Amino acid sequence: MLGGQKPRWVDRHLSPYIELGVTLDNAHVPSQPRRQHMSLSDFTPIATAVLSGFFLLVGYVVQKKLESTRAVAEKRRETYSMFIKSTFASIDARGTGKTFDASEEIFWKAQVLLYGSDEVIRALGDLQTLLPRTNNAPTENFTQTQTASAFDALIASMRNDITPKNRVNAQELRRASPLLIDRQSHSLPPE
């Protein structure tokens, strides 16, 4: 600077910064005190982002819960149908005297115990007490009607477990039961 005067280029190039209160040595000199008031519209983007995040999280949790419920219901359907299939294969083998590997029946029975509802497990226990334990051992003090009724109760509890809006009654189940004893009249013979 010549004789304490500042060059012309300083005024021309730095004047916008000087108006904002910026000096050459980066010290801040406020030109006027400013007051900023936050209005409700300033919070709108923040509130929108927070609400969007919340609803996305709730939607994700609900979707995962529905998927889990569907997966368990599908596993129950598979377990129940395979248990019934293996049980009938076992009954057929025992009735005809064929050799039968009971591991499949035991596996599906264990699956029912894992995935079945409390009602299904109780009905399975009731049926198991009526079935013979060995190939040729007769069931003690139980009739075929009692065994068929216990089986129908098991089927009904399985249906209630996988089909909550079940309107089939015991008599309708009895007519369609795979343990139908008298196929001609669709009723059980008198004891």
Image (spheres, grey):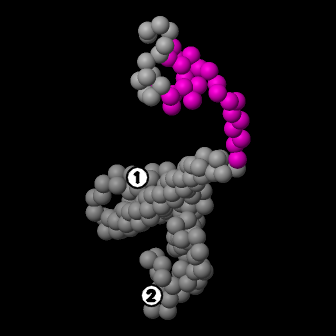
Magenta stretch: dominant SS? loop
Which amino acid lies under the numbered mark 1 shown in the image of this protein?
A: Ile
Q: Which mark is residue 183?
A: 2
Q: Residue at x 47, y 7 (%)?
A: 3
**Separation of residues labelled 2 and 1 (CA atoms):** 30 Å
Q: Can residue 169 be seen by looking at this rendering?
A: yes
Does residue 15 sit above or below 81 in this rendering? Answer: above
Q: Which residues are magenta?
A: 14-39
Q: Position of residue 161 (x, y in %)?
A: 55, 65
The furthest residue to the left:
99
Q: Residue at x 48, y 82 (%)?
A: 176
What residue did someone put label 1 on? 106
Circle 1 residues within 10 Å: few <14, some 14–19, many ≥20: some
Q: Secondary structure at mark 1?
A: helix
Please tell me how many numbered marks the rendered image carries.
Answer: 2
The furthest residue to the top:
3
Circle 2 residues within 10 Å: few <14, some 14–19, many ≥20: few
Q: Is residue 26 left or right of residue 47?
A: left
Q: Earlier in the sequence, mark 2 or mark 1?
A: 1
Which amino acid lies under the numbered mark 2 shown in the image of this protein?
A: Arg
